Image (spheres, rainbow, N blue to C red):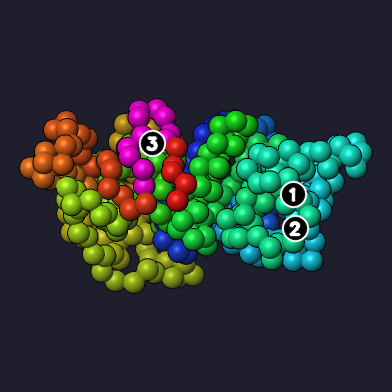
Amino acid sequence: ETISFMARESETVAIVGESGCGKSTLAKVLLGLETASSGSVTLGNQQIQSIGVENRSVETVSSIQMVFQNPFDTLNPSHTVGSQIIRTLEKFNVGNTVADRRQRMLELLDLVKLPRAFETRKPRQLSGGQKQRIGVARAFAGDAKVVVADEPVSALDVSVQAAVTELLMDIQRKNKTTMLFISHDLSVVRYIADRVVVMYLGYIVEQGTTDQIFSPPYHPYTEALLSAIPIADTSVIKKHIVLEGDIPSAMNPPTGCPFQTRCGYKKLVPDNLCETQVPPVKNLGDGHMSLCWLADDVLAKMEPVIKFDKEHAANEGVPDDAPQGVGPGFAGAPPQRPHGKRPKLTDG
């Protein structure tokens, strides 16, 4: 439908939402696999929204690359790892000679922390995590300015998800690449993203910094997503929110607010506005935007979805001034990051 956001150089923007919200369609438009029906997509100073991938220049294609969700389907089983990376380098006009491209291929294996001996291996000889590392190497082969990571670890074993995620973060920092991280796992998003875009039924319903998204006031849909995060920490109290009703069809969307068929707050909005009119984009301050009819006083009364049981936390050594609405306890996540820094994830 109507979406608008910006991703800056070296920034990680997470795009989250349920299946069918439009995350992958957005990625396809950015990559040129589909063209936008209206609006604009600007890469640097270049308008690319109406240029399909087959008509894009080599420079444009190499500038915006993708790490796909399923590494098992992205490699040719008949070719060696080295030849597939070299083929990518040839497509991107990297290197003047065969020797140059082979040297660059070996450097890319170093970059993704795989032994150089892997150049002669076939994909069937690699684990899922190793295959995804090859996918990362190919995405960065042409010095990409933007990398779209479409659920890059969801198809991998839990034991290697953290290692691949950390690899992406390390390479991004080193290359100052912009990363669009598409995910449904907010426990990962909390620790890698600078900003978060929440999508529902083709709309951006909320966007802001990671701390803004994980602290009230929330869009009602974001509040429900946060309540679905699995948390094993017994010192954490989590609000339990159950959405009623089914996700509407994108082919036959509801009138008014896209979330109104499942929202428990719409009874607080007068004159049936939620059911009849698409909400305006409300500025909650400091770039925190929400697509919602709720009045400011209602938003101000929202409580954190996730907070500490202070009595229990005291027994566990958690400081009294620990922030509410954020913090440790998300399943599979490391300790809370220091302000302005992204932590290293431990290799499971």
Question: Where does the image place residue 1, in percent across and percent down from the top left?
Answer: 49, 55
Question: Where does the image place residue 125, in percent across and percent down from the top left?
Answer: 68, 63
Numbered label attached to residue 266: none
* Distance of label 3 from label 1 (alpha carbons): 42 Å
Numbered label attached to residue 209: 3
Q: Indicate the quadrant where residue 93 lies.
A: top right
Is residue 6 among the parts visible in the rendering? no
Q: Is residue 340 rendered magenta in the image?
A: yes
Which residue is denoted by mark 2 in the rendering? 121
- Look at the picture and state if 254 lies above or below 135: below
107 on left or right of 6: right
Q: Residues within 10 Å of mark 1 (few under 14, many from 20)?
A: few
Magenta residue span:
333-343
318 on left or right of 133: left
Q: Secondary structure at mark 2?
A: loop
Which residue is denoted by mark 1 in the rendering? 117
Pick the front one: 25 or 95:
95
* Distance of label 2 from label 3 (alpha carbons): 42 Å
**At 45% across and 37% down in the image, what residue appears?**
344
Q: Residues within 10 Å of mark 3 (few under 14, many from 20)?
A: some
Nearest to the eye among marks 3 and 1: give it.
Answer: 1
* Distance of label 1 from label 2 (alpha carbons): 8 Å
Q: Indicate the quadrant where residue 335 lies.
A: top left
Question: Where does the image place residue 282, in percent across and percent down from the top left?
Answer: 33, 40
Look at label 3 and name its amino acid: Thr
Question: Where does the image place residue 285, in percent across and percent down from the top left?
Answer: 31, 31
- Are the residues at dot 1 and dot 2 in contact (C-beta closer than 8 Å)? yes
Q: Secondary structure at mark 3?
A: strand
Q: Residue furthest right?
A: 97
Look at label 1 and name its amino acid: Ala
